[in-house]
RNA sequence: CGGCGUGUGGCUCAGUUUGGUAGAGCGCUACGUUCGGGACGUAGAGGCCGCAGGUUCAAAUCCUGUCACGCCGACCA
């Protein structure tokens, strides 16, 4: 093999994680940059991942009674301003529309950064009686936030997401929905994306603008930084009061309803990249891989090779898998590297030698392991292998996360860990925002969440030493 | 919004210090030989040097301005 040709390199993640990420995004052909800063083209390979996420998440939503709707992308300024905390949270990063054609608008409108206000405006007209409740709506759309610094999938000025907005007669029902959706997200991440997450509640400092309580799932990336991967908010009746939404209850009294919202975004794709990827490129969990198996024919000009490849393709497609034959005139080595960069979970190699022996070679993307298998019954073999890959990927991600999760019971220990390592640190907290601020200033570390699974690992706050109230996961975040 | 950096064929970049009329590798096209970890030969196509001014006999190169993008911070899914 001559190595004169320079292979397009992916920077090693050990050398420069940020550059590695950018390289993988580009080499896996997920996106392209555009002439609008912070807005990207989702190329077929990238968009197909989103479609698979969308499809499978939407099915799970609907199984819990969610219905999809679509609301406008513009919000009049007066509407945005109705809830004080909310507008303060979002005003610094909204994009404004000031003209319609050549005429200045009477009132400027922002492009939605999130749709709470629109849903409230809508529910105000929709909800009058307890019989109108609950409404459990969701919309798939894009939103715009004028971010200063942008990164593909992790932070773009326009991003795709889903936002669920529900409205209920009682606070209990709203809380139940809030938690239910968070659990759904967590389960989705583990079962579909093979990403283990920590479920918990955000501190007041970190909660959503206008929310009474924000719950979050936090995932840990390969470099030890945390990524907020989905949130679920309980608004109490705060928005209802601000927007004057009322309903007549069974007892014939006027009441304010209770609301929730919950969302996940294309950031999940960033999480997949940074949890599973390696120095050869993307590694996709089979359940969200647009192509689950690629068949690479060897000596494809030779009679019978392409036919054999096609036969395998058909057997796999009949079994319901997403499969491609790479019959381009590149060399096999090229095709291998290409399939690896794109993260295709399984590669099937089939050449004259194999055909003669009635076999094919299966290569796993996640481990690199190659095995031989009989062409006869190959679909069953691949099915089992994809299943195993999906499970192994979750297991490995969990192990790595656990290895990067530390415990600190004193300030010295806490600071020592963060000065040497990056990861989650479990430590007790007194509940005072001043401690969060101090920690953030000193270490650029924020409270990621107060996990549902609480434990009392010490009596004292890791920062001030006062009486501890909560166990908190701390970390550096994206 | 602050700091840093980069704009030259499709891509990555050299050329800018010292001004002289545009180069390489990859990719692309055609044909042929190859094919089990990024194969090779031959022949080709392709560039308003981000944009606008200025200096000069002459500007990719010097000056001024401007735009865009990338990275790092502060804020955020």
Image (cartoon, coloured by chain):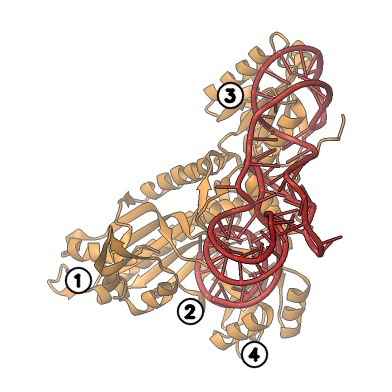
Chain colours: A orange, B red
In primary-sequence order, the first of circles 2 and 3 is 2
Q: Residue at x 44, y 74 (%)?
A: A92
The quarter in which the N terminus of chain A is drawn is top right
Q: Are marks 2 and 3 in contact (CB under 8 Å)?
A: no
Q: Are marks 2 and 4 in contact (CB under 8 Å)?
A: no
The residue at the far left in this view is: A252
Q: Residue A66 vs residue A366: left or right?
A: left
* Place of residue A431 in the rendered image (x, y in percent of width and height, measured from the top left): 54, 84
Chain hosting mark 3: A
Could you give the CA–CA distance between mark 1 and mark 3, rounded to whole angstroms?
55 Å
Could you give the CA–CA distance between mark 2 and mark 3, rounded to whole angstroms?
51 Å
Query: Please, what secondary structure does the residue beneath circle 1 have?
Result: loop
- Counting every numbered tag in the picture gives 4
Could you give the CA–CA distance between mark 1 and mark 2, rounded to whole angstroms?
27 Å
Chain hosting mark 2: A
Chain hosting mark 1: A
Residue at the disc numbered 3:
A316
| Label 1 environment density (alpha carbons within 10 Å; few <14, some 14–19, many ≥20) | many
Residue at the disc numbered 4:
A464
Q: Residue A122 vs residue A92: left or right?
A: left
Residue at the disc numbered 1:
A246
Chain hosting mark 4: A
* Front residue of this view, candidates A50 and A393: A50
Q: Residue at x 51, y 40 (%)?
A: A48
The quarter in which the C terminus of chain A is drawn is bottom right
| Label 2 environment density (alpha carbons within 10 Å; few <14, some 14–19, many ≥20) | some
Residue at the disc numbered 2:
A204
Query: Please, what secondary structure does the residue beneath circle 4 have?
Result: loop
Res. A236 visible in picture? yes
């Amino acid at each position: 093999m001559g190595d004169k040709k320079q292979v397009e390199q992916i920077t090693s993640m050990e050398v420069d994680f940020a550059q590695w990420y950018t390289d993988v995004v580009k080499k896996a052909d997920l996106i392209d940059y555009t002439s609008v800063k912070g807005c990207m083209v989702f190329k077929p390979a990238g968009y197909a991942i989103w479609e698979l996420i969308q499809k499978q998440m939407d099915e799970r939503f609907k199984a819990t009674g969610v219905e999809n709707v679509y609301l406008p992308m513009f919000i009049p300024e007066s509407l945005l301003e109705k809830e004080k905390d909310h507008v303060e949270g979002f005003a610094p990063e909204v994009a404004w529309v000031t003209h319609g054609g050549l005429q200045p608008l009477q009132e400027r409108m922002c492009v939605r950064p999130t749709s709470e206000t629109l849903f409230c405006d809508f529910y105000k007209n929709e909800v009058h009686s307890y019989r109108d409740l609950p409404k459990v709506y969701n919309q798939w759309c894009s939103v715009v936030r004028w971010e200063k610094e942008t990164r593909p999938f992790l932070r773009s000025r326009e991003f795709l997401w889903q936002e669920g907005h529900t409205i209920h007669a009682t606070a209990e029902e709203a809380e139940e929905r809030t938690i239910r959706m968070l659990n759904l997200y967590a389960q989705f991440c583990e079962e579909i994306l093979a990403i283990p997450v920590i479920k918990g509640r955000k501190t007041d400092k970190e909660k959503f603008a206008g929310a009474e309580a924000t719950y979050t799932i936090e995932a840990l990336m390969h470099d030890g930084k945390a990524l907020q991967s989905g949130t679920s908010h309980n608004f109490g009746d705060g928005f209802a009061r601000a927007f004057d939404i009322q309903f007549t209850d069974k007892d014939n009294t006027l009441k304010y309803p209770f609301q929730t919202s919950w969302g996940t975004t294309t950031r999940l794709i960033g999480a997949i990249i940074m949890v599973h990827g390696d120095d050869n490129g993307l590694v996709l969990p089979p359940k969200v891989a647009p192509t689950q198996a690629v068949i690479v024919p060897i000596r494809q000009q030779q009679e019978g090779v392409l036919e054999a490849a096609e036969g395998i393709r058909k057997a796999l497609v009949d079994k319901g898998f997403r499969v491609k034959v790479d019959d381009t005139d590149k060399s096999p080595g090229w095709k291998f590297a290409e399939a690896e960069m794109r993260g295709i979970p399984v590669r099937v190699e089939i050449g004259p030698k194999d055909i003669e022996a009635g076999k094919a070679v299966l290569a796993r993307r996640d481990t690199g392991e190659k095995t031989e298998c009989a062409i006869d019954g190959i679909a069953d073999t691949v099915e089992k292998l994809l299943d195993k890959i999906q499970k192994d990927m979750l297991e490995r991600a969990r192990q790595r996360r656990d290895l990067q999760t530390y415990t600190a019971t004193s300030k010295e220990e806490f600071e020592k860990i963060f000065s040497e390592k990056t990861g989650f640190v479990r430590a007790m907290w007194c509940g005072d925002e001043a401690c969060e601020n101090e920690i953030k200033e000193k270490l650029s570390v924020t409270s990621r969440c107060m996990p549902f699974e609480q434990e009392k690992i010490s009596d004292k706050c890791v920062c001030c030493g006062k009486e501890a109230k909560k166990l908190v996961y701390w970390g550096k975040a994206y």
